Image: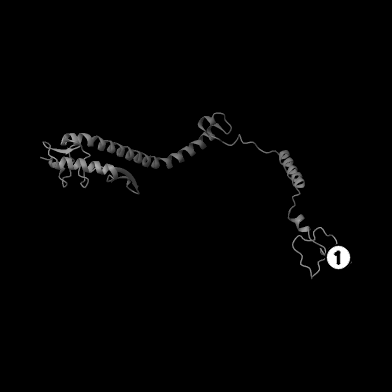
């Protein structure tokens, strides 16, 4: 006779706890946390899927439909209800342990997310207070991981002047020209209307005579 707690309509869990009817309120599954505004973390139970659902269903059916005094012929032997459950239940318990661990991690992350904003604000205020209390440049500040900016190297006037001279000399060596210098460079030669001059053509002809016209002039 099957345990009456296996009744799909019964809210109580059968022997083993996690082997309740998958469709009943006592079914195991993945528990996750959802942070609802105004309510805080809310636990959401998701039904099992994949092989976990398969094992759960087998356990439920075994407890419900296979008599404890009977058995099931399989794998060349007669397996009793107890033997079947002894094989399946540890697997289902392992799934449940993993589900519980994942749910615990999610709950911890939700709790951490709620703590971070005020903690960050507190840390920033504490750093400002430490600088005000010990003074900028105090060698104690690094013990707290506080950087007050005093160790940053400042550029002197002489260094800035030297850098400006180096930039100018580099431009001369590279032949780099600014907008004003480039605007002064223009083609001033003569171009015959009957000759199509391509961009760059005649650049080496200072007299402005179109290329190819010397023979006609002779």
Along the line of sight, which residue is nearer the eye, 42 or 93? 93
How many circles with numbers are drawn on the protein?
1
Q: Quadrant of the C terminus?
A: bottom right
> Which quarter of the picture shows residue 213?
bottom right
Q: Quick one: quadrant of the N terminus?
A: top left
- What's the residue at 24%, 41% (across, down)? 55
Depth check: give the residue in front, 180 or 195: 195
- Please provide percent x and percent y for residue 36: 34, 48
Q: What element carries label 1?
A: helix
Give the color scheme: rainbow, by chain, secondary structure or one colour.
one colour
Q: Position of residue 201 (x, y in %)?
A: 77, 61
User: Among all residues in the image, which is located at the extreme right?
Assistant: 218
Q: Relative to residue 162, is residue 24 drawn left or right?
A: left
Question: How many C-alpha atoms fall within 10 Å of the one at disc 1: few (<14), some, or many (≥20)?
Answer: few
Q: Position of residue 81 (x, y in %)?
A: 16, 36
Q: Which residue corresponds to the image point at 50% horizontal and 31% vertical from the top-left? A: 144
Q: Residue at x 42, y 40 (%)?
A: 116
Q: Left of 53 or right of it: where is 174?
A: right
Residue appearing at x 43%, y 39% in the figure: 119
Find the residue positioned furthest to the bottom. 194
Q: Quadrant of residue 65?
A: top left
Write down the residue under mark 1: 215
Image x and y of residue 30, in percent: 29, 43
Q: Nearer the viewer, residue 204 or 127?
A: 204
């Amino acid at each position: 006779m099957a345990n009456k707690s296996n009744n799909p309509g019964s809210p109580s869990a059968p022997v083993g706890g996690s082997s309740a009817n998958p469709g009943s309120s006592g079914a195991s599954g993945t528990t996750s946390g959802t942070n609802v505004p105004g309510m805080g973390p809310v636990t959401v139970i998701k039904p099992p899927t994949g092989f976990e659902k398969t094992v759960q269903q087998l356990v439920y059916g075994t407890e419900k439909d296979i008599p404890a005094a009977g058995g099931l012929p399989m794998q060349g032997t007669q397996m009793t209800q107890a033997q079947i459950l002894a094989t399946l239940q540890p697997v289902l318990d392992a799934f449940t342990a993993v589900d519980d661990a994942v749910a615990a991690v999610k709950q911890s992350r939700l709790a951490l997310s709620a703590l971070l904003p005020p903690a960050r604000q507190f840390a920033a205020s504490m750093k400002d207070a430490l600088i005000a209390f010990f003074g900028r440049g105090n060698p104690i500040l690094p013990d707290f991981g506080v950087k007050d900016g005093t160790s940053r190297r400042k550029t002197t006037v002489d260094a800035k002047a030297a850098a400006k001279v180096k930039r100018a000399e580099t431009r001369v060596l590279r032949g780099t020209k600014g907008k004003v210098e480039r605007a002064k460079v223009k083609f001033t030669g003569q171009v015959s209307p009957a000759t199509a001059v391509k961009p760059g053509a005649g650049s080496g002809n200072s007299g402005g005579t179109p290329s190819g016209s010397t023979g006609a002039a002779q």
